[in-house]
Image: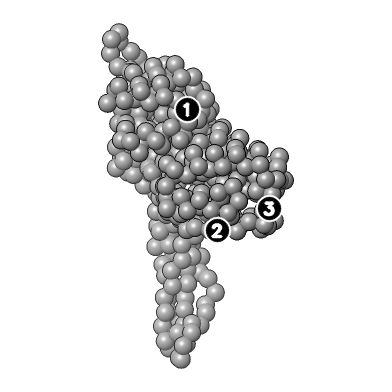
Amino acid sequence: MASGKLCLIFAALIAAFPLFGEKKLQVKMPHPPILGEGLAGARVILGEMTGRCSKEFSALLRQDLLAHNIPVEDQDAKDGAPEVVISVEISKCEALPLEAMLGSGIPAPHIARTQGHFEATVHVRDAASGEELVAQPLRADPAKQNEAQTTMPEYPAPSDLIEIARLQALGQTRHLYEAWSDNREIAFLDDKDCNLRQEFELFKAGDYKGLLPAAKANAESCTSAKSAPAAWYDYGVASMVVQNYSGALAAFEKTGRLHDNRMVTDAIAECRTNKDLAQALARHIVAWVKRAPTQPGKEVQTGILFTNDLVIRLVQGNVADDEILKMIATQPNRFALADEDVAKLKQAGVPDAIIAAMQGRK
């Protein structure tokens, strides 16, 4: 569910659009934190940690939160700020030797391998309502090996592999509160019909500013029964790249009506999941702001730092424009409003009135 992954379709469309050239690109795709700036806007409390290695992982998590300027407080501390509770359920934390093997070469080296395993789920919930914001799965399976030419070497120490697994899992936990990126293979349709080739070149160049309006115009103007499904699919992918889930859903639903395909069905389901997550977080950010103590004529002191990503999440979460405008007017911010930043906001569906309010607060 919430693993902070975007709803991009990075898979081959073997059966969907056989008449079109399918191109794949390796792209390093950046992602905002799953919780946006929302986590920094609450009083963070470490809740229950269960399972083997829970004590060690709890210490690592506390240290990492503090290193990211996210204060971690005791449960009995009361300062009036909204509370977010982070708990972890660890189902596996172990390291086991693997079967001995011979490597390649003459003479073949003896290889002794040990593999670590860590599986857990991080739960983030709003303490006031008890509602869960995110359930982030963690999994790490690192392996190490020792080699020797004449005799079987010692196996790598299990304790070392367990520590590596914990650190790798901690890195996945950071997706909640730190921007991250991953390498993805993106499928995009390329053909001369409906200007799909032009869209592909824009996508290949990373020109998302030009890609989205071009893809939208091409999809809306394409009248070919053969080409229209591909045009709407490409527009859906272009919308997802800029986190415009509403636009992506509309495009994929149109694609589904024109050409039934399992990949499109999966895309719609994943987009709806991501949009539901955005809505859930948006509701809690609004609640945190409303619950925060205020003084007449002063900014609301929630600790939430408003950024472009957080505004996009509120818009995608269907928060009313008036509510967003009030929060922009009363919260500290770190907006980026260069021309390319404003273009990204518009591509993500942020209304002009909200962009103007952001510019007025810089």
Foreground pick, 6 / 216: 216
Nearer to us: label 1 or label 2? 2
- For the question of whether residue 89 can be seen, the reply is no
Foreground pick, 126 / 160: 126
The three-letter amino acid code for the residue at tag 2 is: Lys
CB under 8 Å between discs 3 and 1: no
Q: Residue at x 45, y 35 (%)?
A: 347
The three-letter amino acid code for the residue at tag 1 is: Val
Q: Residue at x 31, y 41 (%)?
A: 68
**Image vertical order of residue 293 relative to residue 1, above or below:** above
Disc with the residue nearer the chain's start (1 vs 2): 2
Q: Residues within 10 Å of mark 1 (few under 14, many from 20)?
A: many
The three-letter amino acid code for the residue at tag 3 is: Ala
Foreground pick, 202 / 67: 202
- Farthest bottom residue in view: 106
Q: Residues within 10 Å of mark 2 (few under 14, many from 20)?
A: some
Residue 315: image tag: 1
Residue hosting label 3: 16
**Image vertical order of residue 195 relative to residue 77, above or below:** below
